[in-house]
Image (tube, grey):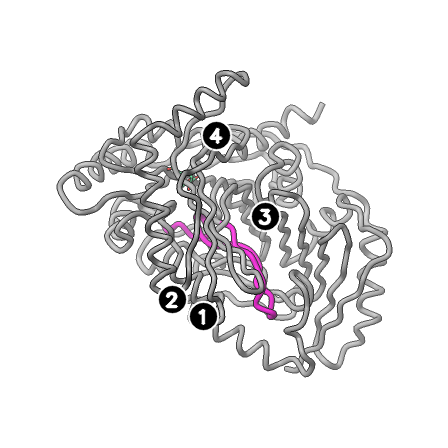
Amino acid sequence: MSLQTRVIALNESPQLAQLIALGQQSDPYFAYETPEQDFCLFGFSSCQTWWPIAFGNEVGRLQDWTTKLKQQFQTDITGYDRGLGPQLLGGLPFAATAKQQSRWGIFRHGYFFLPRFLITKRDKKWWLTVTAPLAEDLAKLAEDFLHRLQTIEPLVTAENQVLNETALYAEQWQQGVRDTVARIQRSDLDKVVLARPLVIEMAQSIQAAGLWQQLRQRQPATYHICLQAQGQAFVSATPERLLKFEPNQFATAAVAGTVRRGKNAAEDEQLGQALLADPKNRGEQAFVVATISQNLEQLGLQVSHPAQPQLLRNPNVQHLFTPITARGLDKVTPLTVLAALHPTPALGGVPRRAALAQIAHVEPEARGLFGAPIGYLGLNELGEFAVGIRSVLLQGQQATLFAGAGIVAASQAENEFKETALKFEPIRECLKKRLDSED
Ligand SMILES: C=C(O[C@@H]1C=C(C(=O)O)C=C[C@H]1O)C(=O)O
């Protein structure tokens, strides 16, 4: 099928409430906002979708799909700026997995779509990209879409309440942490990130676009991402960038080590400084910096980063954080870099292969999109992927939250359990808040 695309500068800024309302009705739908809130993408309906039904070589197959898509365009689609023109929106799975139990449905092996309608906010301006088969009238499609967007009523938050909450595998998980610590102490395994699910049942079906909006209001300084397709959705308020592709370089970050936020500025500062001075957390984060750097250098890229980590603060937790940049992108494609980096030791472990085997051994369920690359990749090769943590899978009335913690030789199961509980909080609070905000 031959495709065509057109980018239109919008004179009037769309209303966020209307984008959200239209998003709630769209299938598929994707919303993406950077922590700086200076760049947003909203994708509605698809021209084509990619969701493999079997596992294995996901990155290679996504690359093949991208190459095929590029060939379907009659006109040059590579010259657009970031976020404009045809974009692939979605996520890859955390790991190729055949045998583990999975609740992820069509997201299980990854899901991307090429949107028919894409609204982009960048440099304080708004744009619409329309992409459709050659036979369709792009001007008419754009006109109808904008009319729909301008006339849609804002989303009415449905009345909802939490029915029950189950921390799955709680005991089994803590035993898994203890076994992992023992294994780390007696082998050359250094770090394994172990995650666990929390299932929340609500009285009514959960509106993904509405939850995205709530997270955006309550937790502004993170990415805000929503991927909705075939009746289910993945929503993430992750603080963590996996990769940003710029014209001549790309940017990534090493995030690890966690402590809660203080009750006041002085306590907050003290907790932050203690985290910066703590050998366990510093060691854990240094693994992440070293491994990311090595993986990139092996691709022939020139890597640079500051010598000392900084603090990355979110409402409930603070982390150690080192920004990393690499040059020499002409040697590799974006997806090659992504495959080399993911999963970083922030979500997998060190050494990677042994850590992934330990994760598969301890965790009964497939991680799906949790901890996985989620974002956009333009056919112009500019894009950005975040790490899909602080996230939730929504399926009707059921929300499954996942959170993980880095396990090293000095880890204690109870503390790691508490740390994961802390990481559930932002989304858990939003789901509960719906109850309070109904009055
Ligand atoms: C795995 C998660 O977070 C990761 C693990 C961290 C840690 O172990 O301290 C910190 C930040 C993230 O890289 C999560 O939020 O689920």
x and y, in percent, of residue 181 in the image: 21, 36
Q: Are marks 1 and 2 in contact (CB under 8 Å)?
A: yes
Kindly indicate whether the residue at mark 2 contacts the one at mark 3 (C-beta within 8 angstroms). no
Residue 68 lies, with reference to residue 144, above or below; the image says: below
Which of the two labelled residues, at mark 1 and mark 2, occupies the earlier sequence position? 2
Mark 1 against mark 4, which lies toward the viewer? 1
Q: In which quarter of the image is ligand 1?
A: top left
Q: Which of marks 4 and 2 is nearer the N terminus?
A: 2
Is the residue under label 3 in contact with that under label 1 (CB below 8 Å)?
no
Asked which secondary structure carries label 3, the reply is strand
In-image side of 185 versus 403 (left or right): left
Q: Which residue is drawn at 57% across and 68% down?
A: 381
Cα gap from disc 1 to disc 3, whole angstroms: 27 Å
Magenta part of the protein: which range?
366-386
Q: Residue 300 carries which label?
A: 2
Q: Residues within 10 Å of mark 3 (few under 14, many from 20)?
A: many
Q: What residue type is labelled 2?
A: Gly
**Which residue is at the far left?**
186
Return the mark for residue 317: 4
Graded by Cα atoms within 10 Å as few (under 14), some (14 to 19) or many (20 or more), the crowding at tag 2 reads: some
Q: Which of 127 and 201 is in front in this view?
A: 127
Is 207 situated left or right of 172 in this image? Answer: right
x and y percentages locating residue 78 in the rendered image: 63, 73
Residue type at numbered disc 3: Ile
Magenta run includes residue 368 = yes
Q: How far apart are marks 1 and 2 (CA)?
A: 9 Å
Q: Mark 3 points at which residue?
A: 225
User: In the rendering, at what x and y percent does residue 257 appear?
Assistant: 38, 35
Q: Residue 332 carries which label?
A: 1
**Is residue 162 rendered magenta in the image?**
no
